[in-house]
Amino acid sequence: MEETIDSAVQALHSPTESLRQPLSDRYRSIMFLPLKSVDKIDTLNSDWFVIDLQDSVPPADKDRVREAWRENLRSPLLTQRNLIVRVNELDVAEHLEKDLEAMIHPGINALLLPMLETAEDVRRFDELVTLAEKHQKIPQGSIKFICLLETPAAVINARDLATASARNIALSFGHADLLNCTMGEKGWDTLLLPRSMLVLAARAAQLEVIESPFFELDDIMAFEQQCERSKRLGFTGIFVLHPRQLQTANRVFSEKRSKVENAQRILSSGSKGCFVDRGTMLGPPFVKRLKKICERGYFEFDIEHPQGNVTGRVIEHTPELSDILRSGCFSSPYEVTITSAWLTYWHTLCFTGNPLEYNNKKAIEHGLSEVPIPFNLLLAYVLCVAVEVLTEKCFLHLSVEQARYHSPVYPGDTLHARISLIQAEPARQGSAAVLTTFHELLDTDQKPVFSAIKKTLFDQALPSVGPTRAQYNLPVGLTRDQTLRVKFGQASPSSNHGSIGEQKAIRAGELILHSDSRLLGRTENTQFNTLFRNTLPIHGNYARHQEQDIVTCGLLILPMVLGVASRDLKPLIDHEIDHCFHTNKVHPNTSLGGVSYIREIAPYNEYYDCVKLRTLGLKQVDVCQELANTKFPLALFETTLQRPRAVEDLCQVYLPYLAGKIVLVCDWTAYRPCQPQ
């Protein structure tokens, strides 16, 4: 017997032996096929099918089921399928012997080996299968192994199991028996360690790795979430228990079409070594991953219905770059009445240090009809409504400049937006374009009430024949003095208008650490995008993007950071944004704070000071506790900063603790009552 086993195992490793290869190299879905469903197999697009002779078959029925499957293997329905047999475990030798006698067959690709403990178990299976192959006169080594790791010992020995036999093509996870052994509770967190150990062991041995089945058959959304998490961890596919799970498994464990097309684009560029693609550094490991993405391909489900099919069309709302350049002027499709509900929402979201924006009595005392719509709300609105008609296809929002509040807007006023192109110029050695646009909010009399200038980067080259740098001119706008401030700026805050609140003294050249912070949650992010008509997918399309990839709109970050700052600068009667840009991404459920450097304080008139300052927005920093004794380089505040990289470069050298944590740089002008000398 020993000689027979040794010679058979040697034949397994013989390079001259013709081994049967699997019909498919995909492992997205591995479906347990009931005996009664064999005649329906043509309707089931599973990559692999499992014939189960173990748990699903009572001991009294095993002989009958085994013989029925043996007969079915002659059916042409099964001849072109990837078939796996889950045999009985080594401890029930009688049934295992019968399983191998009946199912070691040219129509079988692999065995699913249950209840393994050590590598010796796999080697014992190898010996038995080798003998059965010889007995059945099929090529030695034809039958492959998928090791089912469902005991604590198997998980601990995962690496040894993965390398125990040359027949191994995959490791698979069985959480039900594992939890039965550990008496643990089912949950992603409780099973993350064994899952991770399987993935690492399988990949180290260059094997595939299959996720445990999902037993809640009616909860397809939960099944999809399980597939998504497993794929992110490194699993190749999942065991499927019901046909309704098949399409989800095949789709999730394939790649998205956009991801495959992007990978093909990068690979076709021919870039070598380390290179930058659309702002991301790529190198050899990334290129290998891109090739695997292309090999995996995307999922297509095209089954013709007897009554015919229809293909959908996506309605494009945002014009192409060439159309933007050709037109030069756009109007938002939304004309919105700003109701008092907007004020309620805004004040629950953003703090304001301007009492005229929340105190009706003070607003009237200062020449207004009532509390006006806040500056930052209008700034967010005028730029958000431009997304659909202008920037939905842009690559990056660069900066906001010269934001001005010209005429008071009150609850009940109806506004619409107009966007004019000022300038289009090449960037990135001509491979991209920067557009400078002028954004206005107009009332029903077509009078401008608010305006701002914005710079946007498009990841497209300017057309060879098109607008030049000087072709567009800034629309005839409003001068600096034609702002909301003129409405009440000549009045004394301490005369007949009364006090507008406690005022803390500040001085030029000092850095203020703002003690306040605000948590920007997923709910606030969703509400903002809905209310402000922000349609950019990266800000809120959770169907297209993973939650960790959703980026909070900068027009929500800006007012939250300035709100944190204005608590220490109050009372303010007006402010303007001179120049603002974002440096690092902010995701929902992030805490925002800030610091402000007072650059200059000068009289605006005999009653009000004009304060020039630069505010840095910070994420996930307890400013007062963590930065109390920190030495900030003055270059962060007193030099002209135009790009995120300039900020990051300074931090990397002189302030490494804040590297990656500065999310916003805002140069702004605030107007507040003159402070006592």
Image: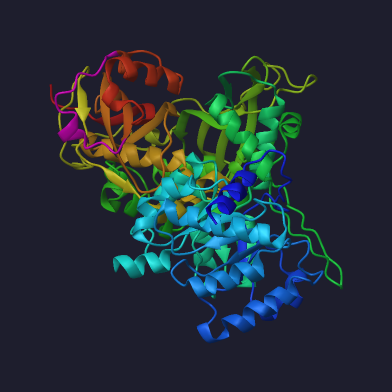
Number of marks: 0
Decide whether the magenta segment is chiefly helix, strand or loop: loop
Q: Can residue 413 be seen in this view?
A: no
Task: Give the side of residue 414 with respect to residue 16, left or right.
Answer: left
Instruction: Name the quadrant containing residue 578.
Output: top left
| Name of the residue lying farthest toward the bottom | 60
Q: Where is residue 409 in the image (x, y as percent from the top left)?
A: 45, 47
On the rendered structure, is 379 left or right of 300? left
The answer to whether residue 667 of the structure is visible from this angle is yes
| Residue 343 on image: x %, y % | 39, 54
At horizontal 33% and vertical 31% (from top left) the residue drawn is 661
The verdict on residue 632 being magenta is yes
Q: Which residue is drawn at 57% across and 73% down?
A: 53
Q: What stretch is highlighted in magenta?
A: 619-634
Depth order, front residue of 479/509: 509
Which quadrant: the C terminus? top left
Q: Does residue 278 lie above or below 428 as drawn?
A: below
Q: Residue 483 location, x and y as percent?
A: 43, 33
Q: Residue at x 15, y 28 (%)?
A: 628
